[in-house]
Image: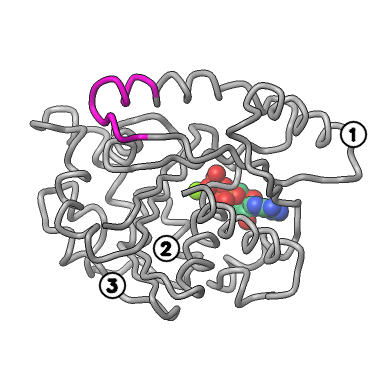
Amino acid sequence: MGKTYVVANQKGGVGKTTTCVNTAVCLAEAGATVLLIDIDPQCNATHGLGMHETAGPNSYDIFSGGDAPAAIISTSIQNLYLIPSTRDLAGTSVELPGRDRREFILADALLPVAVNFDYVFIDCPPSLGLLTLNALVAADRIIVPVQCEYYALEGLGQLMQTVEMIRAGLNPRLEVAGLLMTMYDPRTRLSTQVVQEVRSHFPELTYRTIIPRNVRLSEAPSFGMPISHYDPTCAGSDAYFDLATEVVERE
Ligand SMILES: Nc1ncnc2c1ncn2[C@@H]1O[C@H](COP(=O)(O)OP(=O)(O)O)[C@@H](O)[C@H]1O
Ligand SMILES: [Mg+2]
């Protein structure tokens, strides 16, 4: 049975989608069978893989009671499958609160699916709302991207508390796979300080791999490509390859 990873942080713009897409692609390119699930109504992971919103299957179907297998589509990358997102998913913030087992909708739907994949990666919206809670309840591991910025640690406490709360009740399997420092700029002292600070708070949990700020990483999604296709030799591509290796090592 494969492992389900959720990439989450309630802050926006910290590198969740970039991490989720590129790690999933690296693992698929290494030969693993990978399912990426986009549950952000902004659909960035879906678009970043060159897929567009259609009337076809999507993650909103799952949250409105549909089967997960029917929502899976193939992508241009071998071994990589996708449950795309749609803007309609924004409606779940009003629809889900009244539902039975509202935190378990995704976990229940993925039960018959996860067995068919080596890895499932879930890309979350920037909040700790019910969509992210569903992902945390469905996952074995959480990867937390942390941007090398001044307020990096702010919000991490709340996220860790949420993880603890979920472990204590809704999903005892959930473990923190690692904290990932993103958008590191070696020219600024701030970046180095933030890495040191996060490492001193979370020495075991912080990944050795650091994702540099790399303009190629920010360009790739507009071409609908993962970094390994857009520019396989850039620093960002190397870093995500290293991360994927480290993710597998930590298992
Ligand atoms: N390492 C990086 N270097 C440069 N730009 C990056 C990097 N990681 C992400 N970006 C860009 O920063 C923005 C936010 O990243 P994204 O992965 O979408 O964050 P989130 O999903 O947490 O909101 C996007 O435009 C993305 O292309
Ligand atoms: Mg995102």
Amino acid bearing label 3: Ile
| Residue 71, x across and y down, in percent | 21, 64
Residue drawn at (23%, 52%), measured in percent from left and top? 60
Locate the N terminus and report the quarter of the image it occupies: bottom left
Helix or strand or loop: what does disc 2 sit on? helix
Kind of residue at badge 2: Thr
> What span is colored magenta in the figure?
164-174
Give the Cα separation between the discs numbered 3 and 1: 44 Å
Q: In this view, does 142 lie above or below 199?
A: below
- Which of marks 2 and 1 precedes in the sequence? 2
Residue drawn where x is 51% and y is 52% of the image: 17
Determine the secondary structure under disc 1.
helix
- Residue 189 numbered tag: 1
Residue 230 in the image: state x and y as whole percent: 64, 75
Q: Which of marks 3 and 1 is nearer the N terminus?
A: 3
Amino acid under disc 1: Arg
* 3 vs 2, front mark: 3
- Going by the image, does 33 lie left or right of 30? left
* Mark 3, secondary structure of its residue: strand
> What crowding class fits label 2: few (fewer than 14 Cα within 10 Å), some (14-19), or many (20 or more)?
many
Q: Does the magenta stretch include residue 29?
A: no
- Left or right placement of residue 131 versus residue 231 in this view: left
The residue mark sitting in front, 1 or 2, is 1
Q: Mark 2 points at which residue?
A: 46
Alpha carbon separation for disc pair 3 and 2: 11 Å
Give the quadrant of residue 239.
bottom right
Q: Image check: 21 left or right of 206? A: left
Q: How crowded is mark 3: few (under 14 residues within 10 Å), some or many (20 or more)?
A: some
Q: Name the residue under label 3.
A: 73
Location of residue 72 in the rendering, given as x and y in whole percent from the top left corner: 25, 67
